[in-house]
């Protein structure tokens, strides 16, 4: 465990609400963790055409050089880069017909997870003793996730029932 890290997961909640003349609302942050690692996130929503078409977009970027330091290969085994984005559109086509379209993309690259076996043969590790954990493997793990998710929902309200169709891709 690197003592200079202080569990520095980024994006502390210090953001300013944003509004535009088109009745949109949103919030964004762009800041760094105490270690200087970048973190940006934001979400904005509002009408495109009042009472007919609405949007919502959000995204984030986080980066960390890791919490642990490997003394064998002199690298942090638990680094990561995380890019994520999402968009949603809602169409109020008529009083009876509504359409929702949504999509999300994630791109996450990172190091491997470190597994520690306690030297005393115990089956658990006391979290207060984390400073004693030393990573010594010479293999630098890597994990990645790339995901695209999209869906469309169509709703039509009849006099006594609602017909709904949901189609998704992942």
Image (tube, rainbow, N blue to C red):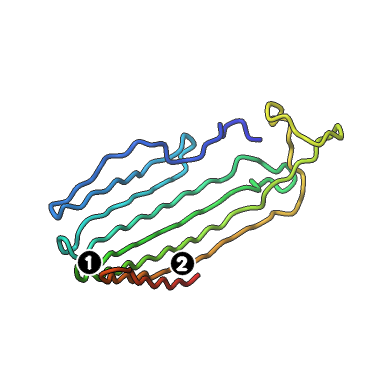
Closer-to-camera residue (52/81)? 52
Q: Return the x and y of residue 122 as percentages of the image width and height.
A: 83, 33
Instruction: Say which quarter of the image contains residue 5.
Output: top right
Looking at the figure, which quarter contains the N terminus? top right
Rendered view: 114 above or below 125: below
Task: Please state if 135 lies on the left or on the right of 24 as rendered.
Answer: right
Task: Please state if 142 lies on the left or on the right of 121 as rendered.
Answer: left
Closer-to-camera residue (160/54)? 160
SS of the residue under disc 2: strand
Q: Which residue is mark 1?
A: 92
Q: Which residue is mark 2?
A: 149
Instruction: Say which quarter of the image contains residue 129.
Output: top right
For the point 69% across and 31% down, the residue is 130
Between the residue at mark 1 and the residue at mark 2, the CA separation in whole angstroms equals 23 Å
Rendered view: 148 above or below 133: below
- Of the image marks 1 and 2, the number of the one nearer the N terminus: 1
């Amino acid at each position: 465990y690197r003592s200079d890290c202080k569990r520095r997961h980024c994006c502390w909640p210090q953001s300013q609400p944003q509004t535009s003349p088109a009745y949109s609302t949103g919030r964004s942050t762009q800041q760094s963790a105490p270690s200087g690692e970048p973190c940006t996130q934001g979400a904005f929503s509002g009408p495109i055409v009042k009472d007919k078409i609405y949007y919502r977009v959000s995204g984030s970027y986080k980066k960390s050089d890791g919490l642990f330091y490997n003394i064998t290969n002199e690298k942090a085994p638990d680094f990561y880069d995380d890019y994520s984005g999402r968009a949603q559109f809602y169409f109020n086509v008529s009083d009876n017909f509504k359409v929702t379209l949504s999509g999300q993309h994630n791109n996450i690259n990172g190091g491997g997870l470190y597994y520690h076996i306690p030297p005393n043969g115990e089956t658990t590790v006391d979290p207060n003793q984390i400073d004693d954990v030393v990573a010594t493997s010479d293999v630098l793990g890597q994990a990645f996730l790339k995901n695209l998710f999209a869906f469309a929902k169509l709703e039509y309200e009849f006099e006594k029932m609602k017909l709904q169709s949901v189609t998704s891709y992942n």
